Image (cartoon, helix red, strand yellow):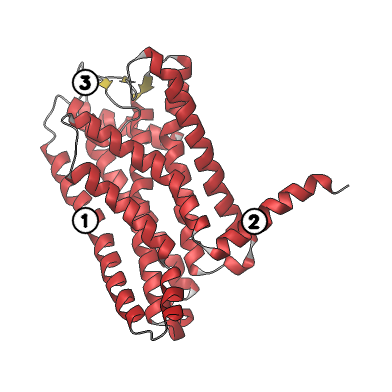
Amino acid sequence: MKTLCSFLQINRNMHQGNQTTMSEFILLGLSNKAEQQHLLFVLFLGMYLVTVLGNGLIILAIGLDSCLHNPMYLFLVNLSFADLSSTSTSVPKMLMNIQTKSQSISYESCLTQMYFSIVFVVIDNFLLGVMAYDRFVAICHPLTYTSIMRPRLCVWLTVIPWFLSNMVALTHTLLLTRLVFCDRNTLPHFFCDLAPLLKLSCTDVMINELVLLIVGSSVISFPFALILYSYVCIIKAVLRISSAEGKWKAFSTCSSHLTVVLLFYGTIAGVYFFPSSTHPEDTDKIGAVLFTVVIPMMNPFIYSLRNKDMKGTLRKLINKKRLLPLIP
């Protein structure tokens, strides 16, 4: 992270020369009312601990149980890691600001926070597309599943989304370093998000907004198209199964993933396409809370409660932890 901060500072100096710029930003948080700070601290601390515990247990359970060492759970480990990291990018700083009553964040730390928040939200989107493809192969081509989903392909399907996510984040971050913020440094947000930062700039942000529109649309549309195609094929394959038991068994293998997809894209549609708030900054805050806190907290419950293998592994893991203190 220190290397990234140094790189951002060097790049900023190269593009801005002797122009006067802000050395820090002020994060106003979710509310400016003093009486609500304690409630926000307790609420977000609780959600953060649940997120870390839930996603940590999933990563630990899959890592320890050899029965879960298959492509579907490899992608789930990456999703859990991304969710845990996404929350850790913004919530601890928010909690520290509330506790210390200090709202400042340095320029380099702000851009670093923005970079990683973009990475982890984008990787969630890509991984949902990869997981849909995995379910498509498992249900539509069950006899050739192992030959199609070879270890080498699974590695590529894991590495490429991470690479693309970092490229997306790096593109936005480098474009942001070209901007000047003059005397405006108050950010009406609880962490450094891209859209509010663009509104603060006193220079032309047309290129940034154009790239945000093109890249953002691509990041959402391509994985969503893959998910849509995969589930159309899955539904056709399930309908061809004669027995009701067979249909239910086939559908149950992708029910957890489908629930997460509906939650993720339903949030996008509800917040950004049908916003109920008349204040754009409220829309940004609502979307950020949902993507960085609520969804990462919900995903472990969805996968553990709707997946028989995960429930069994987690039960064995928890029981083992309970028995360890009793062993002399």
Identity of the residue drawn at 26% across and 45% down: 171
Residue 259: x percent and y percent?
A: 38, 58
Q: Is residue 279 left or right of residue 148?
A: left
Q: What label does residue 218 carry, if any?
A: 1
Circle 3: residue type: Asn
Identity of the residue drawn at 60% across and 53% down: 60
Point out the frontmost of discs 2 and 1.
2
Q: Which residue is mark 2?
A: 315
Q: What label does residue 102 carry, if any?
A: none
Disc 2/disc 1 C-alpha distance (Å): 40 Å
Point out the frontmost of discs 3 and 1.
1
Q: Which residue is mark 3?
A: 18
Residue 182: x percent and y percent?
A: 19, 19
Q: Is residue 309 left or right of residue 30?
A: right
Disc 3/disc 1 C-alpha distance (Å): 36 Å
Please name whichever residue, 299 or 213, is drawn nearer the observer in this view of the structure: 299
